[in-house]
Image (cartoon, rainbow, N blue to C red):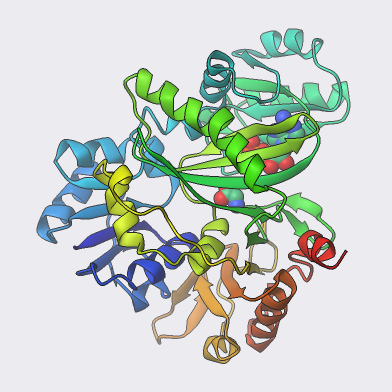
Amino acid sequence: MNILLLGGGGREHALAWKLAQSARLGKLHAVPGNPGIAEHAQCHAVDLTDHGAVVAFCHEHAIDLVVIGPEAPLVDGLADTLRGEAISVFGPGKAAAQLEGSKGFTKDLCARANIPTAGYARTRSADEALAALGTFGLPVVIKADGLAAGKGVVIAQTPDEARAAIADMFAGHFGEAGAEVVIEEFMTGEEASFFALTDGATIVAFGSAQDHKRVGDGDTGPNTGGMGAYSPARVLTRDLEREVITRIIAPTVKAMADAGTPYSGVLYAGLMLTRDGPKLIEYNCRFGDPECQVLMLRLKSDLVDLLSAVAENRLAAISPPDFAPEPALTVVLAAQGYPAAPQKGGLIAGLAEAEAHGAKVFHAGTVRDGTGVLRASGGRVLNVSARGPSVRAARDMAYRAVDAIDFAQGFCRRDIGWREIAREEG
Ligand code: AMP
Ligand code: GLY
């Protein structure tokens, strides 16, 4: 089977690494890929917003399955275009990707299907938002409706902060994403991520994870795309996981199917484990990054089998995914200045030495320059990942590998997994 993998971050390197382990894989192509992905795939430059060009590429390279990594092409409807050309795709179409593409869409669906989530108001103007604000307590959560690269959420502690966030969003600071604003009740509890594969009818659990969103040790500093993660999220017990599937995932999949827009792909639920049970914070229509990296380290099943079964609506006919019970952990090495202004071009060496410690290093934001030297090209640069008998063991192996890497312009958090290690040892 020839596969085209779209994307070029750490998530896609982990997917490429796992796809390459399948006996069913013919040739793997990637757009745009990165130097890590290039170890498993032929990388190409194709403009993903040019759907015609992607279709032509698939025909030219006899692609049997397209795996879409990032959210932007999904929300943009690339999966629909490909399906329209009878090309199999892993990933939802435009209408189903609204679960990530519009927070208001998801909140309305939750309200209709009685899915536990924070109380909310959808607003289309600053006046409407300010009027709704009075019905919420403090803190209050203000969100740009659309895709804002993880930056469109403000937790306002005071009415002034809330009003400023509303003004910013309607002033266009988040572009089109802020044309509508969702105001939400603030929920408290521990956060965890749960993943499910679905072909629109069958649902199978696909593991759990927890990440560290803040840039600094002790969960301080600005939010990022994630500075590290581990899997499984043991706080999400078997009973809680069952509750998440029956009360959140299954009604969502059913509502999407009933609306004539079945959801096909991976559904990533961001959850708040509140005193009243798990509640949905938000959905993503793709794998988490770096959550995918730790899931792939634990996955024992053949990824080509799973993704093609989802794409071909035959998930019920194959064995459910099997994960190693041992935990996996990943540490993000980022470029200095991340998240505000990461320095590009920093030299990277020592990856073979790092992997000699038993870790796996996924490339997230790297390039090879004209002379073949590896350099940083993004905010999050490498995902140093390891599996072990405990989270502490996985973490120790990952940090030994981090210390073997020569990346003077990089930094990482030193406390990835702290909460879970405290529980493990408490
Ligand atoms: P989101 O982009 O929707 O995942 O939000 C980013 C982060 O904001 C989440 O991971 C939570 O930490 C926090 N957050 C979002 N919505 C809420 C809420 N209703 N209550 C409490 N925290 C929230
Ligand atoms: N790590 C969070 C995300 O992928 O959205």
Q: Position of residue 28 (x, y in %)?
A: 26, 67
Q: Quadrant of residue 148?
A: top right
Where on the picture, by quarter, is residue 142?
Answer: top right
- Name the side, left or right, on which 34 lies relative to 292: left
Q: Which quadrant does the C terminus fall into?
A: bottom right
Work out whether residue 24 or residue 158 is closer to the camera in this orientation and state it.
24
Quadrant of the picture in which ligand 1 is shown = top right
Q: Is residue 31 above or below residue 240?
A: below
Q: Nearer the viewer, residue 395 or 213?
A: 395
Observer-nearest of 29 and 416: 416
Q: Note whether residue 295 is visible.
A: yes
Where is residue 204? Give x, y as percent.
44, 45
- Asked if residue 364 shows in the view, the reply is no
Number of numbered discs = 0
Tell me the quarter of the image containing the N terminus. Answer: bottom left
Residue drawn at 53 percent across, 67 percent down: 324
